[in-house]
Image (cartoon, helix red, strand yellow):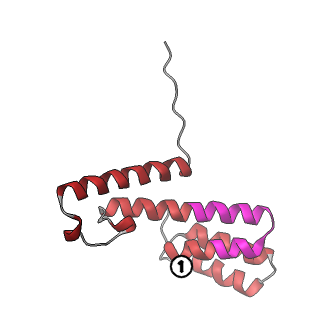
Amino acid sequence: MIPKIREVPDVTWTQERLKYRILKFRSQRTSEHSTSTMPDVGVLGVIFPLSWLLIILFLQVNELKAQGNKAFQAKDYDAAIDLFTQAIALDPKNHVLWSNRSAAKAGKKQWADALADAEEVSGSRFYAI
């Protein structure tokens, strides 16, 4: 029998699975301790391990980038610029976001702003994923 090949989950599936795990973690924490002793810190009022917060941040940035790319393809440059700006606020060292926003500004014929974003990409403070 040939095993089924599992498809790579999309971002929505991953976010739903992560929410499930977060709520499960929260219920375990509240059953171990009284809720009055738990500080209201972090997403959904839970203290998360750093890796979970990074995953949530990564998912948010990728979702904003995907929406920005769709807006750019639809030639809705204002929406694309706004979405890429939101993503840059979350991940300012991601050179792809700066490059995409530069392209959206060029599409709107904002040449000076497009050049400024393009010059940000040429800096040495960026990383590649």
Under circle 1, the secondary element is: loop
Residue at 51% x, 32% y is 6
Instruction: In this rendered view, identify the residue nearer to me: 29 or 129.
Output: 29
Residue at 48% x, 50% y is 16
User: In the figure, residue 120 lies in which quadrant?
Assistant: bottom right
Residue at 29% x, 66% y is 47
**What is the x, y in percent for residue 102?**
69, 75
Q: Is residue 111 left or right of residue 46?
A: right
**What is the x, y in percent for residue 43?**
39, 67
Look at the image and say whether residue 97 sits in the magenta stretch.
no
Above or below, 64 relative to 20 = below
Above or below, 55 relative to 109 = above
Which range of residues does the magenta coloring cover? 63-83
Look at the image and say whether residue 81 sits in the magenta stretch.
yes
Quick one: label 1, few (<14), some, or many (20+) residues within 10 Å?
Answer: few
Q: Is residue 104 left or right of residue 128?
A: right
List the single residue furthest toward the bottom. Answer: 112
Q: How many marks?
A: 1
Label 1 sits on residue: 123
Residue 40 shows in this picture: yes
Q: Is residue 62 left or right of residue 49?
A: right
Q: Is residue 22 left or right of residue 5?
A: left
Residue 129 shows in this picture: no
Q: What amino acid type should be assigned to the residue bearing mark 1?
A: Gly
**What is the x, y in percent for residue 33?**
18, 60
User: In the figure, residue 30 lies in which quadrant?
Assistant: bottom left
